[in-house]
Amino acid sequence: MKTFAIFLLLFTSLAAAQQVPAADSTSRKQDALWHKLQSRIEALDHDCDCVMGVAVLDISSGRTIFLNADEVFPTASSIKVAVLAELYRQSERGGQAHLNDLYSIDPKDLVADSQIMAGLTPGMTKITNHDLATFMVAVSDNAATNVLIDRVGMANVNTTLSAMGLKETRLRRKMLDVNAAKEGRENTSTPREMMQFFQQIYSGKLLSKQAQQEYLKQLSTGKDSWIPRLLPEDVQIANKPGSLEAVRNDVALILVPNRPYILCVFTTYDKDEHAAEDAISKISLAAYETFDRLSRASQYGRVISPRNSR
């Protein structure tokens, strides 16, 4: 009887071991996939004649990939994600600016690259801060951005960034203020800090759930930019690109179902700006292909598509 009990215990243990794959086996396979993604990113960096910084965060597992992640880069228009966040924060917490506040078009506010604002009737057209935010994000309208910077307050943007624990992410000038840039007052961030910014947005540390959803919807409006360029159209991508001479950036929260991730790519000293844009798009595609498989795979790594269920 004792021998039978021992046999039964051994049989049960073996059966359980066969039914459930070891967790470390799954982890090893995902480690291998993750290292391949890192290698692809490093290869694209090597082939691009620029200085590149990259931060990738798998929100589900906490895995990260960093390349020059703590180097300080000029943000160009990517800093507008912070201006937008401050508008939403103040609007729901009783700050000096609210989404429904009205603004009358004033010609003195117009600057270059203000496609929408320049076409509105001065002194006659009234729009809301929400409209200004849409112009700022969807077409990167610089006049709309500068009006919003005045309305939310540059100092308030930086105070919020400091409260988020970000030391190098700073708004120091308005859009197209070349004199400020020559004086060294540049808008800056690092890949790691911009990743942390989106991580706090996603986790609800800065905005309420409703404001967070509206914020991400604003950043997901259709636009021609480099992180979304090679990805499927049905993937929600909350991002903001930025461009200056010899600078190309794009920062994003990509909401792949069951496997959201953050990707921030900065480039500077670009010899060929189009090559830098292409590198950002290819890094984005490599990341998406990895996260898409992880989102649809079993613990063994098998992906079962609807048309292939056998």
Image (cartoon, rainbow, N blue to C red):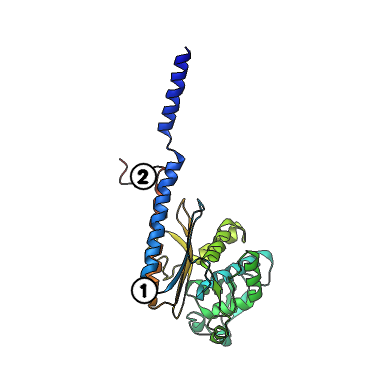
- Residue 93 placed where, x, y %? 68, 64
Q: Please tell me in which quadrant of the rendered image residue 104 appears.
A: bottom right
Q: Nearer the viewer, residue 78 or 26?
A: 26
**How far apart are the alpha carbons under marks 1 and 2?**
35 Å
Residue lying at the far top in this picture: please name it.
1
Residue where numbered disc 1 is placed: 275
Q: Earlier in the sequence, mark 1 or mark 2?
A: 1
Left or right, 304 with respect to 185, comes to left
**How busy is the neighbourhood of tag 1: few (under 14 within 10 Å), some, or many (20 plus)?**
some
Residue where numbered disc 2 is placed: 302
Label 2 residue SS: loop
Give the mark toward the camera: 1 or 2: 1
- Residue 47 placed where, x, y %? 36, 69
Left or right, 5 with respect to 274, comes to right
Above or below residue 7? Residue 89 is: below
Left or right, 231 with respect to 190, comes to left
Residue 242 numbered mark, or none? none
The three-letter code of the residue at mark 1 reads: Ala
**How busy is the neighbourhood of tag 2: few (under 14 within 10 Å), some, or many (20 plus)?**
few
The three-letter code of the residue at mark 2 reads: Arg
Q: Nearer the viewer, residue 188 or 147?
A: 188
